[in-house]
């Protein structure tokens, strides 16, 4: 029960890493506010939380729409009076080198992956500041640190999230609010399955080469990232501030000879 008494808001919690984290947080005693743009996926996460004996609330909304985000924060506070943990997890992929990236894809990825973090944080921070407590976890990626082929806008967006995390930490340290970032390697989720389908003629061959990027020789699981999020959400990480936390099977720092 590492999150007993805490209320956590997780964006994009209808699938993949967000869903896995929502289930883990609930199993650790948190009341979990599940946000997602998709009704079916978000409701399904909450149904699973409840089935496992936890407490959850689904609040649908698009993280790029200020009015929807403000409504989510308002309804969360009405229901639970507090938000202790914000996990800015919602994100989308974007494939292509700069010359291949359409302007509307650039705008979409930047909007969801960067502006989404800004808007949700902006809506939640006043509540955390008033209570002088909080942990914000921003979803970056190890792609913020390493160059990968044909990922121009995606890497730019995740680099921006890492920079924003450090800047936010400085601004909110005096409010006893911690802001850290997660930097996963490749994690097997619907996001990656779609990327493989859309980007490669032979997705199975591509999957093998993705696995070799990690020293582990395999992809990560959503649960691997959820465990790292749990650490950042809990008071056990009280001395982590403005830090990148890598969960990447060695993709960033390791290299086979
Ligand atoms: P996922 O399975 O696609 O889950 C993302 C969820 O976010 C989906 O339910 C998606 O809904 C939702 N979403 C998309 N746009 C949204 C919006 N505007 N407002 C609210 N919700 C929205 O992806 P994942 O692999 O778990 O990735 C989660 C996060 O981890 C992302 O930020 C991603 O960039 C990051 N990440 C992933 C990996 C990886 O290898 N999987 C590695 C590093 C970082 P729809 O399905 O309806 O679009």
Image: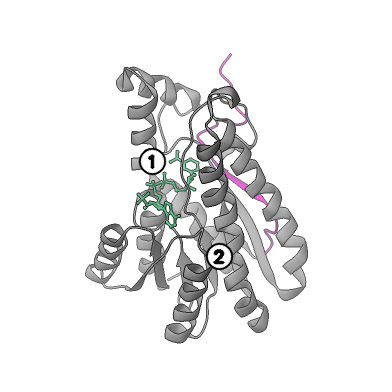
Disc 2 residue crowd, few under 14, some 14–19, many 20+, Cα 10 Å: many
Answer yes or no: is residue 28 visible. no
Which residue is drawn at the image coordinates 34% and 34% (left, top)?
193
**Residue beneath disc 2:** 120
**Residue beneath disc 1:** 191
How far apart marks 1 and 2 lie (CA) works out to 21 Å
Q: Classify the position of the C terminus by image quarter.
A: top right
Q: Secondary structure at mark 1?
A: helix
Q: Nearer the viewer, residue 84 or 62?
A: 62
Horizontal side, residue 159 vs residue 154: left or right: right
Label 1 CB, ligand 1: below 8 Å?
yes
Horizontal side, residue 178 vs residue 96: left or right: right
Answer yes or no: is residue 74 visible. yes
Q: Secondary structure at mark 2?
A: helix
Magenta includes 203?
no
* Residue 150 % position (x, y): 53, 24
Decide which of tag 1 and tag 2 comes sooner along the chain: 2
Asked if residue 155 is positioned above or below residue 53 in the image, the reply reads above
* Residue 59 % position (x, y): 38, 70
Q: Nearer the viewer, residue 208 or 112?
A: 112
Magenta span covers which residues?
Answer: 239-257
Horizontal side, residue 205 vs residue 255: left or right: left
């Amino acid at each position: 029960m590492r999150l007993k008494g805490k209320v956590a808001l997780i964006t994009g919690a209808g699938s993949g890493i967000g869903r896995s984290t929502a289930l883990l947080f609930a199993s650790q005693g948190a009341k979990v506010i599940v946000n997602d743009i998709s009704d079916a996926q978000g409701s399904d996460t909450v149904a699973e939380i409840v089935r496992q004996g936890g407490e959850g609330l689904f609040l649908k909304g698009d993280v790029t729409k200020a009015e929807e985000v403000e409504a989510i924060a308002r309804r969360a506070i009405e229901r639970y009076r507090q938000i202790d943990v914000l996990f800015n997890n919602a994100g989308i992929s974007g494939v292509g080198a700069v010359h291949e990236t359409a302007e509307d894809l650039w705008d979409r990825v930047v909007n969801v992956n960067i502006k989404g973090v800004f808007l949700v944080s902006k809506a939640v921070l006043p509540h955390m500041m008033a209570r002088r407590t909080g942990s914000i976890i921003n979803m970056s990626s190890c792609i913020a640190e390493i160059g990968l082929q044909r990922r121009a806008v995606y890497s730019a967006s995740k680099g921006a999230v890492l920079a924003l995390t450090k800047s936010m930490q400085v601004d909110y340290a005096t409010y006893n609010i911690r802001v850290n970032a997660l930097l996963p390697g490749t994690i097997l989720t619907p996001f990656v399955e779609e990327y493989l389908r859309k980007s490669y003629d032979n997705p199975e061959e591509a999957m093998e080469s993705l696995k070799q990027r990690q020293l582990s020789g395999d992809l990560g699981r959503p649960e691997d990232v959820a465990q790292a999020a749990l650490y950042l959400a809990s008071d056990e990480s009280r001395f982590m501030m403005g830090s990148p936390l890598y969960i990447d099977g060695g993709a960033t720092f390791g290299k086979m000879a």
